[in-house]
Amino acid sequence: METKNTNNIGLDKEKSKDVADNLNDLLSNYQLFYMNLRGFHWNIKGKKFFELHLKFEELYNDALLKVDEIAERVLTLSETPFHSFKKYLDTTEIKSAENVTDGEMAIDNILKSLNILLAKERTILNMASEANDEGTVALMSDYIVQQEKLVWMLSSYLE
């Protein structure tokens, strides 16, 4: 029940807004990450085409799910998720990657993007923990565990 100082899930409104603002920043970065992954999937060439084409599809499908989960978490916190490409472009740290056809360049870009996402997720995890926002903590924790493993695997691929 919403009171003067809490939102509809019983969390402090001000702290929840701060968490939601950071989730919106993460959402913007995920949208660019997703678009880059689509481009890598479409444009990859070379001897590793088949394995990378499939891997990039797996990654962009996962990113698309995360975009939806992040936006829905913002809504759960009684805030509005960003939903325009202008806003995404204005707030993202991940930059657009165009015409990448080389698999190693694509993976290098993915690793750099994952480092950005992980840093943002860790910040949100700490903020959410301080706000007693277990739902956001659990979401960020799941993302971090999955992405740390992905960083290890993609880094091993490049060795």
Image: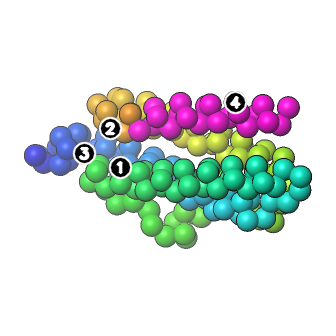
* Mark 1: secondary structure: helix
Q: Against 99, is 60 above or below?
A: above
Q: How far apart are marks 1 and 2 (CA)?
A: 8 Å
Q: Which residue lies furthest to the right in this view?
A: 47
- 62 vs 155, left or right, is left
The structure residue drawn at horizontal position 10% and vertical position 46%, both measured from the top left corner, is: 1
In this figure, which residue is indicated by the disc labeled 4? 152
- 141 vs 105, left or right, is left
Question: Dot 1, crowdedness within 10 Å: few (<14), some or many (≥20)?
Answer: many
Asked if residue 154 can be seen in this view, the reply is yes
Q: Report how many numbered discs are placed on residues in the image.
A: 4
* Mark 2: secondary structure: helix
Question: Dot 2, crowdedness within 10 Å: few (<14), some or many (≥20)?
Answer: some
> Residue 127 or 157: which is nearer the viewer?
157
Q: What residue type is labelled 4?
A: Trp
Q: How far apart are marks 3 and 4 (CA)?
A: 37 Å
Asked if residue 96 can be seen in this view, the reply is no
Q: Which amino acid does label 3 sit on?
A: Lys
In this figure, which residue is indicated by the disc labeled 2? 135
In this figure, which residue is indicated by the disc labeled 3? 13
Q: Which amino acid does label 2 sit on?
A: Gly
- Say if mark 4 contacts mark 2, CB within 8 Å: no
> Residue 45 or 120: which is nearer the viewer?
45
Q: Nearer the viewer, mark 3 or mark 1?
A: 1
> Residue 48 or 108: which is nearer the viewer?
48
Residue 14 tag number: none
- Estimate the x, y position of residue 86 in percent, counting from the top left: 55, 70
Q: Distance between the residues labelled 2 and 3?
A: 15 Å
In this figure, which residue is indicated by the disc labeled 1? 73
The structure residue drawn at horizontal position 43% and vertical position 56%, both measured from the top left corner, is: 68
Task: Considering the whole magenta stretch, tell me its main secondary structure.
Answer: helix
